[in-house]
Image: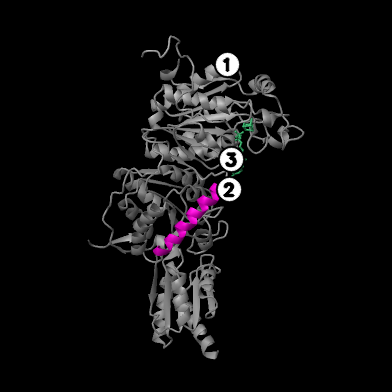
């Protein structure tokens, strides 16, 4: 199939339809509005439900009721409002795909690209002890491909899966080859369909007895342990590297250019790009940290993923951090400068 | 059908109502409301195609009593959950069961927009003028001057405004096809309440729009009254503030 020039937000939307999307609920917010706008045009004609809700709070609760392949998308402020609902979905083991095209924060912040929602996405699905599985694409093609993966993971683990992108990824246009459509199973064993056969189905996250709630939590944690097998990451020019840059999403795109320039200048730099942020590729980071002399983490935040990198590296090598935030996007020369500083730090040591 | 004995059975447990010990306080009318919903689901033959949405409040465990598919919703969000269910399965019957803290405080946005969209769902709304589950605090429906655990000197309208009349608020919306207020304070009122629930479900079955039945209920524990006194207090104090009747009903489902 010929690649078509497509915006990130629209590639995710079309890929979701081809993954068998039956319903979309959302509330407009920049920089992801092309996604619901695309689905408003295309989902009903393909037999799905599109509904603009009165808020992200309502939208995520509509998602909770859908009982079928369902998606919701937003950006920072809306992602905050979804936390309560996501906690219920996680607790009741209801799958969905949630897209967060991150923008500058905190508060209303701005609509420029950022990566400041890493903590919110990876550390806890709202209150309680639940998690989202989190995927972080770095290109429009990968956003399209990971959308299919997200639906499959959501169904397999009966857990919400987040696609964590940023304003740049959502808005930029790149050539994309779309996946072939699939038709997922219609009636899933857990959904409340009112179908009448067998005992009534109940979807709830309530266990008044602590023993029962602990058992539910153990089940969730066991699920997250199993999900370790879904870890995805990519290494680039790491074989003989002294400096390993760790970056995800759009930051990794910028970092790769900087790594190439560093190599041109004779600095042995490489790149580790986590693709799943939860589960985090800790083992991969640990292995790389054992081979290189210094790690440089770069994010469009004040330093969030760097905490997971430091935990994984566990003191094996120094871990430096460089971040831009508030909607400012780092440039390859800035990252190159950081790589050079890191290299000279270890030369001096 | 041949009777099992010379005596004709005139009253019994509706099959949808699960036989189980109740967790509701003595004299609480949640149990009556559950029974009425169960009877209507049975009489309309909806058991195999109904999905309930339980809210956060004393009725959070409604699915322990009603034998249909159920989803337990976050506080106030039941109308949104019901919207998600109904939009994906438009041929099913979907209802929410919500208290007045749930529906009229934290869930005000969800109920108004579900009603305004004309969602073809039925809302069973229990107005007992307090938050029962959390210990009798003030609700938006608390009467002026009424003492609650968070208004120890009585609800002061200067501080908290006046009781919110939900049926009157929703009835004018074009998406609302059926809105009524009933009471659970006497056998006659209970019979009327059941007729109203039946009409609300019929409105949904006929695809006419959103339907809501507001039920004036007692919370003897939250009110600090005996069950009998609570029934009397409901009629004496709540009736003047929350007038009973059908505020809106489609001609098709009118008696
Ligand atoms: C987000 C959130 N806030 C507060 C609560 C605590 N809470 C539980 S039930 C309830 C009030 C329920 O009152 P009502 O809806 O009137 O139902 P009743 O118990 O009277 O039947 C509150 C505030 C909660 N569970 N979730
Ligand atoms: S606290 Fe009130 S509403 Fe709750 S069960 Fe007891 S009497 Fe009923």
Q: Residue furthest front?
A: B5
Whole-Å distance between the Cαs marked 1 and 3?
32 Å
Query: Is residue B168 in view from this perspective?
Result: no
Q: Are marks 1 and 3 in contact (CB under 8 Å)?
A: no
Q: Which residue is mark 3?
A: B106
| Residue at the spot 58% in from the left edge and 40% down from the top edge | B106
Classify 10 Å Cα crowding around label 2: few (below 14), some (14-19), many (20 and above): few
- Do the residues indicated by labels 2 and 1 lie within the same chain of the protein? no
Disc 2 versus disc 1: nearer the observer? 2
- The relative height of residue A23 versus residue B89 in the rendered view (above or below) is below
Q: Which residue is mark 1?
A: B187
User: Residue beneath label 2, please?
Assistant: A210
Placement of the N terminus of chain A among the 4 image quadrants: bottom left
Picture coordinates of residue B142 (x, y %)? 67, 31
Residue most toward the top? B6
Ligand 1 quarter of the rendering: top right
Q: Mark 3 belongs to which subunit?
A: B
Residue A31, percent across and down?
Answer: 45, 57
Mark 2 CB within 8 Å of ligand 1: no
Q: Secondary structure at mark 1?
A: helix
**Where in the figure is residue A16, as x and y percent of width and height?**
34, 53
Region in magenta: A211-230
Among the two numbered marks 1 and 3 on one chain, the one whose residue lies closer to the N terminus: 3
């Amino acid at each position: 199939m010929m690649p078509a020039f497509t915006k990130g937000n629209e590639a995710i939307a079309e890929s979701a339809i081809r993954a068998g999307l039956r319903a979309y609920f959302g509330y407009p917010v920049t920089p992801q509005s092309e996604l619901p706008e695309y689905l408003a045009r295309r989902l009903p004609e393909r037999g799905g439900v599109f509904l603009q809700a009165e808020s992200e709070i309502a939208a995520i609760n509509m998602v909770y009721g859908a009982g079928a392949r369902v998606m919701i998308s937003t950006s920072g402020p809306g992602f905050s409002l979804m936390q309560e609902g996501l906690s219920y979905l996680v607790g009741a083991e209801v799958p969905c795909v949630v897209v967060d095209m991150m923008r500058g924060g905190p508060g209303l912040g701005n609509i420029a690209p950022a990566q400041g929602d890493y903590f919110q996405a990876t550390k806890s699905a709202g209150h309680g002890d639940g998690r989202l599985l989190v995927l972080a694409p770095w290109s429009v093609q990968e956003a399209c491909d990971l959308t299919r993966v997200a639906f499959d993971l959501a169904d397999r683990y009966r857990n919400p899966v987040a696609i964590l992108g940023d304003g740049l990824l959502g808005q930029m246009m790149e050539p994309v080859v779309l996946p072939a459509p699939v038709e997922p199973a219609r009636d899933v064993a857990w959904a409340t369909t009112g179908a009448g056969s067998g005992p009534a189905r109940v979807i709830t996250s309530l266990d008044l007895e602590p023993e029962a709630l602990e058992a539910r939590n153990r089940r969730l944690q066991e699920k997250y342990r199993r999900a370790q097998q879904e870890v995805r990451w990519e290494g680039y020019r790491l074989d003989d590297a002294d400096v390993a840059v760790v970056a995800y999403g759009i930051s990794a795109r910028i970092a790769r250019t900087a790594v190439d320039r560093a190599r041109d200048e004779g600095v042995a730099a490489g790149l580790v790009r986590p693709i799943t942020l939860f589960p985090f590729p800790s083992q991969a980071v640990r292995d790389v940290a054992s081979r290189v002399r210094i790690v440089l983490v770069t994010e469009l935040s004040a330093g969030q993923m760097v905490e997971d990198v430091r935990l994984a590296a566990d003191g094996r090598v120094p871990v430096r951090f460089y971040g831009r935030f508030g909607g400012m996007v780092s440039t390859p020369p800035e990252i190159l400068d950081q790589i050079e500083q890191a290299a000279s730090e270890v030369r001096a040591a | 059908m041949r009777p099992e004995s010379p005596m004709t059975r005139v009253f019994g447990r509706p099959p949808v109502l699960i036989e189980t010990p109740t967790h509701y306080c003595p004299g609480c009318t949640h149990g009556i409301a559950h029974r009425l919903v169960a009877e209507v689901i049975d009489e309309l033959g909806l058991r195999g195609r109904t999905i309930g949405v339980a809210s956060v409040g004393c009725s959070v465990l409604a699915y322990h009593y009603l034998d249909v598919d159920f989803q337990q919703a976050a506080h106030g969000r039941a109308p949104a959950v019901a919207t998600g269910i109904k939009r994906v399965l438009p041929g099913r019957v979907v209802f929410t069961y919500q208290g007045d803290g749930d529906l009229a405080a934290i869930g005000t946005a969800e109920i108004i927009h579900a009603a305004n969209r004309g969602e073809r769902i039925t809302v069973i709304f229990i107005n007992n003028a307090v938050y029962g589950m959390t210990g009798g605090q003030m609700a938006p429906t608390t009467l002026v001057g009424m003492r609650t655990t968070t208004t120890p000197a009585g609800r002061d309208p200067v501080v908290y405004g006046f009781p919110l009349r939900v049926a009157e608020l929703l009835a004018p919306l074009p998406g609302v096809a059926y809105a009524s207020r009933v009471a659970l304070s006497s056998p006659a009122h209970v019979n009327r309440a059941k007729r109203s629930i039946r009409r609300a479900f019929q409105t949904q079955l006929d695809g006419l729009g959103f339907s809501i039945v507001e039920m004036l209920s007692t919370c003897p524990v939250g009110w600090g009254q005996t069950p009998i006194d609570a029934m009397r207090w409901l009629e004496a104090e709540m009736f003047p503030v929350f007038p009973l009747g059908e505020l809106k009903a489609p001609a098709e489902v009118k008696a």
